[in-house]
Image: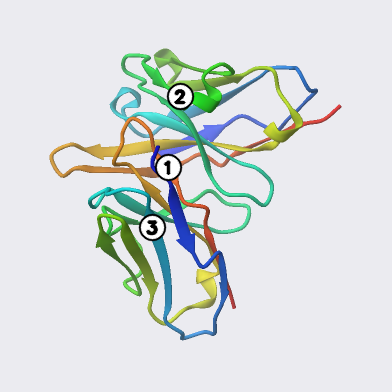
């Protein structure tokens, strides 16, 4: 099975900061990597799919890069509404999918 | 608009079973796989499997193969998840989620989620 790791597990930043979260896969998954944002008490929402494509309605301050085993999600100019937990998810080995453990972003 | 509406909160005893539902609307039910994902209190997301609403085919990770059964009723655009032999560590919010899939573009992501159902397992 593919294992996903994320770092850091949590971070605290200031409004306007640039924030970068990393996700690593235990084996090559190409670009088969999605990022989700989850706010407390809510369902997750897709931010980035296929490693670098922004989901519908996602602000342009979010961006995703990477391939193979190393991926990053960057928030340029952190906003108060970005307080959430962020998860990566791989789908290279369908029919199974795997989520990363999450990164909690605080201000 | 596309919606997935889930059943209400449940309280069950250890050893019991629970059946949750996820009712779809706003799209062609048989066009999109539906997955279930759970989240224990303060924990991350855990994938539980999927059902193809068109064929009824299912896939579960090994962890849940013996305890989870997903079914669907196309006449009411609803997916069901039955979980048996409940334990206290099954206490979690259970989400259903629709997959957007484009084989030509090699794309596969959860584009719509239900609101979640809290299942509490306690004696």
Q: Secondary structure at mark 2?
A: loop
The residue marked by circle 2 belongs to what chain?
Answer: B
For image coordinates 57% across by 51% down, the residue present is A42
Within-10-Å neighbours for mark 2: few <14, some 14–19, many 20+ = many
Subunit ID for the residue under disc 1? A
Q: Tell me the tag on residue A61.
A: none
- The nearer-to-camera label among 2 and 3 is 3
What is the secondary structure assignment of the residue under circle 3?
A: strand
- Give the vertical position of B73 relative to A33 (above or below): above
Residue B59 lies, in percent from the top left, at 41, 22
The picture places residue B114, in percent across and down from the top left corner, at 51, 39
Residue B55 image-quadrant placement:
top left
Q: Residue at x 51, y 68 (%)?
A: A8
Closer to us: B56 or B1: B56
Which residue position is annotated with label 2? B60
- Neighbour class for label 1 at 10 Å: few (<14), some, many (≥20)? many
In the rendered image, which quarter is residue B110 located in? top left
Location of residue B92 with respect to A31 vertically, above or below: above
Q: Chain of mark 3?
A: A
């Amino acid at each position: 099975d593919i294992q996903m790791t994320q770092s850091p597990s949590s971070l605290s930043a200031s409004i306007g900061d640039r924030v970068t979260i990393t996700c690593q896969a235990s084996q090559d998954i190409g670009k088969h990597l999605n990022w989700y944002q989850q706010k407390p008490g809510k369902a997750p929402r897709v931010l980035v799919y296929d490693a670098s494509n922004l989901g519908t309605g996602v602000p342009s301050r979010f961006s995703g890069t990477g391939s193979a085993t190393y991926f990053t999600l960057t928030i340029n100019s952190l906003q108060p509404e970005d307080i959430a937990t962020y998860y990566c998810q791989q789908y290279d080995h369908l029919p199974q999918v795997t989520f990363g453990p999450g990164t909690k972003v605080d201000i | 608009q596309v919606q997935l509406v889930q059943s209400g909160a449940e309280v069950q005893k250890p050893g019991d079973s629970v059946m949750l539902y996820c009712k779809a609307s706003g799209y062609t039910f048989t066009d999109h796989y539906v997955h279930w994902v759970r989240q224990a209190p303060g924990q991350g997301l855990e994938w539980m499997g999927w059902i193809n609403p068109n064929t009824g085919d299912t896939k579960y990770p090994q962890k849940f193969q013996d305890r989870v059964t997903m079914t669907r009723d196309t006449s009411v655009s609803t997916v069901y998840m039955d979980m048996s032999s409940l334990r206290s560590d099954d206490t979690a919010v259970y989400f259903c989620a629709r997959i957007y899939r484009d084989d030509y573009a090699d794309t596969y992501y959860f584009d719509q989620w239900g609101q979640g159902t809290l299942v509490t397992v306690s004696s």
